[in-house]
Image: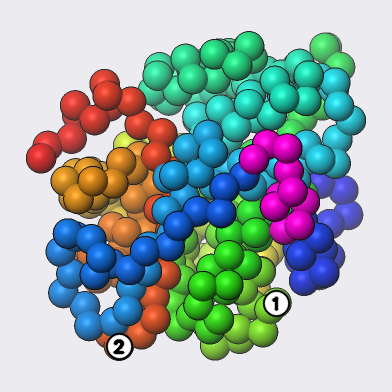
Amino acid sequence: MGDFSADSITVEMLREAHETVRCSPLDVIRTPMISWCQTTLPLNISGQIHIKLENMQRTGSFKIRGVANQFARRPKGGRFVTMSAGNYGKTFAYACKHYISKGKVVMPETAPISRSALIQRFGVEVERVPTPRLMDVVNRCVQEDGMTFLHPYDDPDLIAGHASLGFEILDFIAHPDVVVVCCGGGGLLAGVAAAIKLSGCENTRIYGVEPEGACTMYKSFIEKKPVGMDAKSIASGLAPPFAGVLPYELCQRYVEEIVLVTDEEIKSAVSTLYTAGLVVEPSGTAAFAAIVNNRIPDIDDKNVVVILSGGNIGRDELNNFSD
């Protein structure tokens, strides 16, 4: 990450990345934003709630935004390694194939097997290891095989790419009252929050949402430094071994609060969304789960944006969720 800090992230840098993402040969989609009242989803809130459908994004999640900016700033034909529970790895593999680069994804053993298969289809090697060993294996690939590590959430180019989602939200609603974003390592939350706040929306309240069993950013806020934990959740994409340093700094500066949801609430959210015709993976439902379970304060009569961050869920996984 070099010498980057929260002070280094400027609105000019984020807007440049937004243009890079918009023009990327990876074909990043400007995803739809729909009003909650246009769906069959239950709602007991009087506010105007809008849903950003990143589950319809190219490669199935928001990750392609950051990856598009990362790869645009790396040499074509490089040799890259990363760690991922699925979504970043799938997008990383997609980009490696496009840029004719060699890639390897180190995955936690807890990630669904179907995610490994998605990645391998793009010709990228996958190595599954216990979560505490992820960085050990990455470091081995860097030191012994000469590969370059692309961080899945603690990287300024990645975060700047994710900021494009924040700018798309502002194109739709110039001054949202509340924006609710899922949080794993914090890259998406940091990028969206920085884009919105640095664009002049000082009064917008931005909330991050984590599972109770994988609350690294929540604990980092309490301890006032980035921390790690033995993260376990059905939302494997929100269960990194540690919070990112740069994401933590940006979230401290621009995010109102980190709130928590349970795995049972995430499971229920997957089923509720599926019944309404929206296929969303567990990690992608956290912000929605926070809304329907009243974790976000003072949203009645407010303009609220909720991000459904990913839809990479296999039929085998969907069978684990009740109707």
Instruction: Answer with left or right where residue 96 lies relative to residue 269.
Output: right
Q: Which residue is mark 1?
A: 198
Q: Is residue 268 visible?
A: no
Q: Residue at x 78, y 20 (%)?
A: 101
User: Where are the magenta residues, as a range?
Assistant: 18-27
Residue 204's place in the image compared with 223, above or below, is below
Q: Quadrant of residue 125?
A: top right
Task: Name the spot of residue 104 as percent of width and height, x first.
Answer: 67, 18
Residue 157's place in the image compared with 237, above or below, is below
Q: Is residue 13 visible?
A: yes
Q: Residue at x 42, y 53 (%)?
A: 53
Instruction: Answer with left or right where residue 192 lies relative to residue 72.
Output: left
- Residue 125 among those drawn in magenta: no
Q: Which residue is mark 2?
A: 301
- Residue 25 among those drawn in magenta: yes
Residues at badges 1 and 2 in contact (C-beta under 8 Å)? Answer: no
Q: CA distance from mark 1 to mark 2?
A: 25 Å
Which of the two labelled residues, at mark 1 and mark 2, occupies the earlier sequence position?
A: 1
Q: Residue at x 39, y 75 (%)?
A: 304
